[in-house]
Amino acid sequence: MSCSSCVGKITEALEHEPWVLSANVALLTQSAAVEFEGEHDAKDLITIIEDIGYEASLEKVVQLPPTDAAGLGAVAEFWKASISIEGMTCSSCVSTITDALSTLAWTKSVDVNLITNSATVIFENKGHLGEILLAIDDVGFGATLNNVSLLDKDTDQESRRAVSLRIDGMYCEHCPGRVTGALDHLGQAVVIEQSPTMTKPILKISYTPNAPEFTIRDIFAAISAADTAFTLAVYHPPSVMERASQMHARIRQRVLYRVVLAVIVAIPTFIIGIVFMSLVPGSNPGRQYLTQRSRGVTRADWALLVMATPVYFFGADYFHRRTIRELRSLWGRRSPVPVLRRFYRFGSMDTLLSFGTTIAYVSSIVDLIIESTSAGPVSTMAGSTYFDSVVFLTMFLLIGRLIEAYSKAKTGEAVTTLSKLRPKEALLVLPADARQQASPTKSVNVDLIDSGDVVRVVHGGSPPWDGIILDQDGVFDESSLTGESRPVKKTTGDSIYAGTINNGGPVSIRTTGASGHSMLDQIIEAVQEGQARRAPIERVADVLTSYFVPVVTIIAIVTWLTWLSLGLSGTLPIGYLDIAVGGWPFWSLQFAIAVFVIACPCGIGLAAPTALFVGGGLAANYGILVKGGGEAFQEASGLDIIVFDKTGTLTQGSEPKITDRQFLALENALWDEQAILGVLRALEQGSSHPIGKAIVGLCQSMDVPDLKAKLVEEIAGKGMKGTFDMEKSLHPIEVLAGNEALMADYGIAINSTAAGTLDLWKGQAKSVVLVAARDTSEKPWAPLAILAASDPLRPEAREIIDAITRQGVQVWMISGDNQTTASAVGAMVGIPPERIIGGVLPQQKADKVKYLQQSQVPSRRQRRFFSFSSPLAKRGRAIVAMVGDGVNDSPALAVADVGIAIGSGSDVAISAAAFVLVNSNLTTLLTLITLSRAVFKRVKFNFAWALVYNLAALPIAAGVLYPVKSGGGQHIRLDPVWASLAMALSSISVVCSSLLLRSRLPVVGFRG
């Protein structure tokens, strides 16, 4: 793919298939993500892409979570495929692949990424994998499957490790059998997923580590014992980014060879065509020699023909091959594009460049034939051949493409940088024997470390995987993951993460997350997932570029016909005709060639993805994971409202304390403080709610009886209910512990003194818990106790909310706590009481977010710019972000336009979020808002620059300024050679503009 036209073509071809649900084609990653369903195979996607002239390979296929079909109980199995696509050059290629995959009925979503040369496709039924690859192949791209996975992966399988082993040294057809036979001796501990062969010596297995008794090292030893000739290593299939890097490297190599050829030929071309024919006087012997005719043609023209021909066929072939492939797929028998549409939506940037160089070369050949058949004196006027233009044109175009390829590769370095954080070797702690005072260590490859292994992390070293400190204290620099610059002190039992640096003394850790399950792996996966998702504004670029080539072609033809008719009709002065052969037809061609060459859809196609890629990398540096990709950036840059959950978001949440308690039924012989705290502990010990944890913490600090509940039931958003057998009661006892809403549901009233105490606590921004019980033989409930928990505010909360408000964003708070407590907390952090919603059940939080979306008016900023690109603005409603951390927040995070999960949140909340703040400090939220606006401002600037460039350059290339003379008396026109240079600078400037975001320069850089 070379430009956004390729993106459009591929997208259209994919989405044309009824079984493709969606296709997202990415120009920068040279990839596509396709979601499809039905009985089709992912290879069909490759065929579709290749049929329209691109090369594609299947990256991977994963199954999406099953969904209930119309409530009938039928569940669809969805897979997710990651595919590397070769041949994409612009957003037109992305559109082509996306269209091809999206038309398949069983695809749900397609994300094609130009930067990584890859696609992510979500589709139904793994059998369609081949059809996906075939579809990509059908539209003319090469497709390679990276991986495919089922979206609803069983969480029980997470403890198992799946690994691929490369086995070198197999020398006969019996060797693969010896390998699998060696594993058979290990019994059911190892499951062989794929056996090795002589042609593909890759063994895929899965097993459950149980260090130190059974690890991957035992598997290595078993295979090595089967034959000493076997050499084993863990095989890592190339990722999407690695494949994209390989593709960029191949592109650079191909272009570099052609650049060298063009530069070598350009030197004598410049000497003959420019120096001798234009700069030296006519009396110069060299010029006189070159202007002499040989068989009716000047020696200079013969020389230029000899030099231009190899450049045209072996340098510019880079553009010709792609153009031929595109046209063949467009007009081939298998083309899904309607016949009429083929005339007004075709081509890419390569098409324009191929047309320009071809017209220049062919017209020069024709001119040479005319000149060779004409008899007459040698004219003193300049020659009319464009052989020198073909050489210089091709050279500048190829140099521009080379620089662009280097620049595009730079935009995707974030994932590469993160991948390099993990060390290659680790110090494995071996069991000590009776003769050794300390446990010995052994340096091993990190791939040979399993979950449960003990490793030593020395000063300046990095943990190979996530783990828990076993001894001593350490100080770790976590800035690479969280963006927090201050070192974090770690003690025994604390978690540490791969990618961090030990700034303290040596520590021993027990690994808890091996390959694929560490925080670093999750961050890398989240960054890649975000980069695969496109912003809605990129669709605008796809639409523009899909019509770009036909429009430019029409402009070039009209330009040529206009100048030709003006010349032949005598309207133009004869002095305009400054060529010796060919007359007005050949003279007019120079304007048409310039139009073909200068038009650049690449700048438009690269405007958004390059900025969004750089923004995603910057976000990762600050501890922000952009899971929602470009769409999340786009919506976050135009927020109207930010909604905060209270507990764990504005408050610290992790360590609330029970500050007050009052017992109400001590006169009852059945109940005393110990009994009440005992049942509370039994009720809350399984709760994940911070208040429940605080109650358990209180009980553990006191000598309370260890009671067992017969039945415990959690009442969502309200509290807990349990049944107990008490020694002093003949009947089971039911106990309730929760908020006032729970008590109201059961008709439980408390006396005025206790109610006054509750009001006092709530006014102090404390959360309250009420406890009541009853004998199952009796109906009335009796209040037992009231408790208050204080959850300290985050120290930065007030400052951050003030800063967000100053940026013109409304701040709201939603809490499951009562309105009085929520309002008290809101007053402390500066949220007006009318923007505080308390007493909200978990399932109601999503409804409140929807209410804010529909009831609030979008900002002027959003109405002004987002109206043409944002589907939300088109519906005329506000854009709402939800910030939360708990399981209860997950539905609201999913409903919000921008879900933001803070780092201490649960996995469920994080999966529903568009952004994940690895660092739980709310300062990162302000960085997120500022970065989103900076990134999208750069997107808008890039678009404006690319559009203005094309709108200004096309008329100049068409010759509107030709009647104007410069100071030297020369007519002002843009020669095709200089037009090619201007075209190259257009796309390069867009990429460089995006890369400048990385700098901290005033105005152009991002300072955080």
Image (spheres, rainbow, N blue to C red):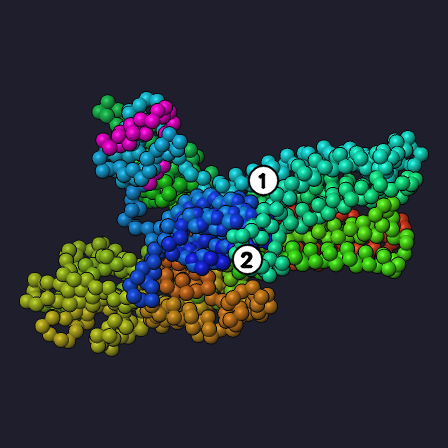
Where residue 559 sits in the image (x, y, percent)? 76, 57
Q: Which numbered dot is residue 337?
A: 2
Residue drawn where x is 9% and y is 72% of the image: 777
Q: Quadrant of residue 72?
A: bottom left
Residue at 10%, 66% (x, y): give it: 732
Front one among 883 and 363? 363
- Using residue 101 as the reference point, say whether residue 438 is left or right of it: left
Q: Which residues are magenta?
A: 162-185
216 left or right of 857?
left
Mark closer to the observer (1, 2): 2
Between marks 1 and 2, how big is the CA–CA gap?
Answer: 28 Å
Residue 406 or residue 616, whichever sits in front? 406
Q: Residue at x 34, y 33 (%)?
A: 196
Residue furthest out toward the left = 730
Residue 333: in magenta span: no
Can residue 117 be seen here?
A: no
Q: Amino acid at mark 2?
A: Val
x and y, in percent, of residue 368 in the image: 80, 41
Circle 2: element type = loop
